[in-house]
Amino acid sequence: MERIQIAIAKARAERAAQESSEASAAMPPEPSPDYRPVEPQTPAPETSLSTPSIERDSTAVAPQDTGLQRTSAEQAWRDLPTLRIDSKKARRNLIVALDNGPEALGFDGIRTRLLQHLKAKNAKRVAIVSPGPDCGKTTVALNLALSLGRQPDQRSILADVDLRRPHMAKALGVRTTHNFADVLSGVTPFADSALRHGPNLALAMTHGPSRNPAELLQSRRAALALDEIQAAYDPTVMLFDLPPLLVNDDSMAFLGQVDCALIIAAAEKTTIKEIDRCERDVASQTSVLGVVLNRCRYMEKADQYRGYYSS
């Protein structure tokens, strides 16, 4: 892992030197976005589990605050149908952040850094993206969202915006006809397309591929839909599971709608050049929050934190 980090740092240094040389003959370069690499310890293949139950829960308690908007948001959250996930089946599929246990520590660490960054920047919207397919970005996004859901003072939304190959519903074992593309296009309200897990985490699924996703994701109507969701539900964090960046232009079409992006790379699969190119493309549209090196099979003892965990 240390060799991978050194290689990434070397690639960035070479890129920075090249950009500095080119800029000296033209105009000064723009400052680079903040970068904080983080590494969870849990591998994340994207697999399915059995169908959980969905029901109405009138007893959910939303985070406390004052003001008419907050009261309206509390009611909006209570009105969402609930989603209950079988924790044992979830663990078998590496959905490990349902509970506060040692396997969730890597995602809890990402959660803490994420919340600190968003608070410092007064931001809310975060994209989860990978250079290519099969990096485990959806499983990382779900675990991060579930980790956020254990924070009682935070409201979080995770939406499946991989409109060509949506995977979130399958990963949770949810049979649904919901389609987040219909929310973005204004056809369906968010309240009819989202499920609430616990009191303060909402999941917006996409059941199948959509037509012309790039055009929809960069449309004015999609931007308006996001603003409406943010105003109505007043979330602390809005996470968006995006398509692989280097496969098509869908993610580039949407990155302008978010405040920052987290890049998911797969150990022994994603190349340094792919990470470097992905960073540059993301940085051209928004801030790069960091790179998560996923699916690490071998960890050094110094990287293992289990000995410090107490239940």
Image (cartoon, grey):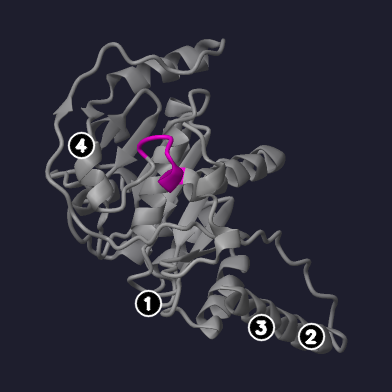
Q: Position of residue 125 (x, y in %)?
A: 52, 45
Q: Name which quarter of the figure residue 228 lies in.
A: top left
Q: Residue at x 24, y 45 (%)?
A: 90
Question: What is the crowding at mark 4: few (fewer than 14 residues within 10 Å), some, or many (at least 20)?
Answer: some
Q: Spatial distance from mark 2 to mark 1, Cα to Cα?
A: 28 Å
Looking at the rendered structure, the secondary structure element under dot 4 is loop
Of the residues shown, which amino acid type is indicated by label 1? Val
Q: Which residue is mark 1?
A: 247
Pick whichever of labels 1 and 3 is earlier in the sequence.
Answer: 3
Q: Name which quarter of the figure residue 194 lies in.
A: top left
Q: Is residue 221 in view?
A: no
Q: Which mark is residue 203?
A: none
Q: Spatial distance from mark 4 to mark 3, Cα to Cα?
A: 43 Å
Pick whichever of labels 4 and 3 is earlier in the sequence.
Answer: 3
Of the residues shown, which amino acid type is indicated by label 4? Asp
Q: Position of residue 160 (x, y in %)?
A: 32, 51
From the image, state whether disc 1 or disc 4 is nearer to you.
4
Of the residues shown, which amino acid type is indicated by label 3? Ala
Looking at the rendered structure, the secondary structure element under dot 2 is helix
Q: Which residue is mark 2?
A: 17
Q: Position of residue 141 (x, y in %)?
A: 40, 51
Q: Which residue is mark 4?
A: 86
Question: What is the crowding at mark 3: few (fewer than 14 residues within 10 Å), some, or many (at least 20)?
Answer: some
Q: Write the start and end of the magenta stretch as one range.
A: 98-104
Q: Which residue is mark 3?
A: 11
Whether label 2 touches label 3, CB < 8 Å: no
